[in-house]
Amino acid sequence: MTEKERAIFQKALDTWGGDAQSLCLLEEMAELQDALCKHKRGRRTTADIAEEIADVGIMLDQMKLYFHIEEETQAQRARKTARVEERLKNWVKE
Ligand SMILES: [Mg+2]
């Protein structure tokens, strides 16, 4: 996240609290799930999905700040991305 985003998200945490923002994350994840499900039935657009992914990303960034795990999250992401890469090398389509 950018420094500007970090400042805004930290202010959101300071203003509304980590517990409330954690609940917002759950709400936003549910909204993304809803958008993905409804897109399958032609009732949501890819723009709707993009909006919900953005919302979830914003809340995830706040959770990284709240739990002080930004670097740890990045390290886990790198490790798991490498794992996906390894699985793809060994993937054999049936
Ligand atoms: Mg939303």
Image (spheres, helix red, strand yellow):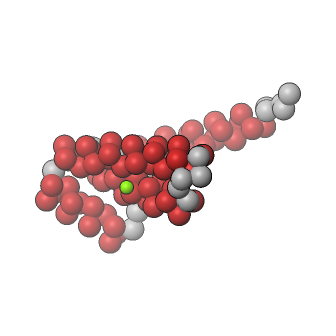
Quarter assignment of residue 69: top left
18 and 67: which is toward the camera: 18
In the figure, 50 relative to 84: above or below? below
Residue 32 position, x and y percent, is 45, 48
The residue furthest top is 94
**Residue at the spot 40% in from the left edge and 52% down from the top edge:** 56
In the figure, 1 relative to 77: above or below? below
52 and 79: which is toward the camera: 52
Residue 46 position, x and y percent, is 57, 59
**Residue at the spot 53% in from the left edge and 55% down from the top edge:** 44
The answer to whether residue 5 is visible is yes
Q: Quadrant of ligand 1?
A: bottom left
Quarter assignment of residue 90: top right
The answer to whether residue 60 is visible is no
Horizontal side of 24 relative to 19 (left or right) equals right
**Residue at the spot 48% in from the left edge and 50% down from the top edge:** 35
**Where's the N terminus, which quadrant?**
bottom left
**Where's the C terminus, which quadrant?**
top right
Residue 20 position, x and y percent, is 19, 47
Residue 57 position, x and y percent, is 42, 55
Horizontal side of 62 relative to 49 (left or right) equals left
23 and 82: which is toward the camera: 23
In the figure, 92 relative to 24: above or below? above
Marker count (numbered):
0
**Residue at the spot 31% in from the left edge and 64% down from the top edge:** 6
